[in-house]
Amino acid sequence: MKIFKTTIVLLVIFAVLFGYYFYESKTNKPVKEDNKIFTFKNNDVNSLKIEKEGKTLIDFKKEGDTWFIKEPIDYKADSIYVDELLDSLTSLTFDRTLEGDLSTYGLDKPSYAIKVSLKNGKSYSLFIGNKSPVKENYQEGYYAKTDRDKIYRVNASSLENFFLTDDYVYKYMEKFVVSIPKNEITKLVFYQDGKEYQIQKGEKDNWKIDGKAIKADDVDNLLDGIVLLQISGLDEGKNISQADQPFAFDVYGKDKVEKISFAKRDAENKYVLINGHCIGQYVTLKDIKNLQDTFDKLIK
């Protein structure tokens, strides 16, 4: 009796899957020539937002040539990863077009929405619904639609970047602590144990510390340590406004100054304040110690 019931259940499941496959086949519209969903280019985009079930997960905006995260934090973005998202969107293709009620494909209440605005004022959206139960050329897919009311089946791997996972905010934020390029640094001021040390670049690219000449290689090592210092993690929602460590430094560029200081987090990491502001980003104590050791060798 138990075997009979199991057989009935399997037959019902098979019938449902077969019916769905038949429905997809009948509603399929052959793809003609170009099967790209969007025609705009990466450089046309000046904002990109990813939503999940109506809630904004992350919102990027471009200011000049620089990308910034605006939600859920306000911070400079890692342009490499933003470009990766845009590549996924602008190269997105579909296997087939479909017709029918949006609820059939989970598009009446889409799980994800990707929204972009362009420099010319136009805007586009991509809504992602259910996963397709049928593979296309052995590839898994999702149902999606644009705000132009077309329904598509798209390859699942093309959408992976938009399904944001844990620590995605850290992934998309700029990791380098100092944004001033190495070749544009003209002055450094270090603060250590209550003392101040000024390192100045001369007209002939020679460096001096408190008026005394120092070796170019020593300065080069110090500059490398500064521009390569990277954020190693983020405690989202944490705000630090007061430094409490005896080591800090200021970096002077052609047209701006970045003041870097540190606050206690744990035995292996320190919060890093940039111009007196920290939103929970931290760096490893090891990296700070390496930089401090390089500085100590220079002043001996």
Image: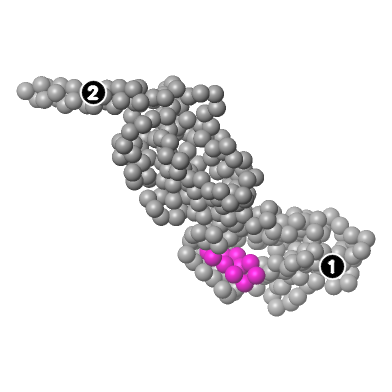
Residue under the image location 87 percent in, 67 percent down: 208
Amino acid type at image mark 1: Gln
Q: In this view, does 238 lie to the left or right of 84?
A: left
Q: Is the magenta stretch mostly helix, strand or loop?
A: loop
Residue 110 lies, in percent from the top left, at 37, 44
Mark 1 surroundings within 10 Å by alpha-carbon count, few (fewer than 14), some (14 through 19), many (20 or more): many
Residue 239 lies, in percent from the top left, at 51, 69
Q: Is residue 37 left or right of residue 283?
A: left
Q: Quadrant of the N terminus?
A: top left
Between tags 2 and 1, which lies in front?
2
Q: What residue would you read off at disc 2?
A: 14
Q: What residue would you read off at disc 1?
A: 200
Return the mark for residue 235: none
When asked about the image quadrant of residue 180, the answer is bottom right
Magenta segment, which residues?
271-280
- Label located before the other in sequence (2 or 1): 2
- Provide the secondary structure element on which disc 2 rests: helix
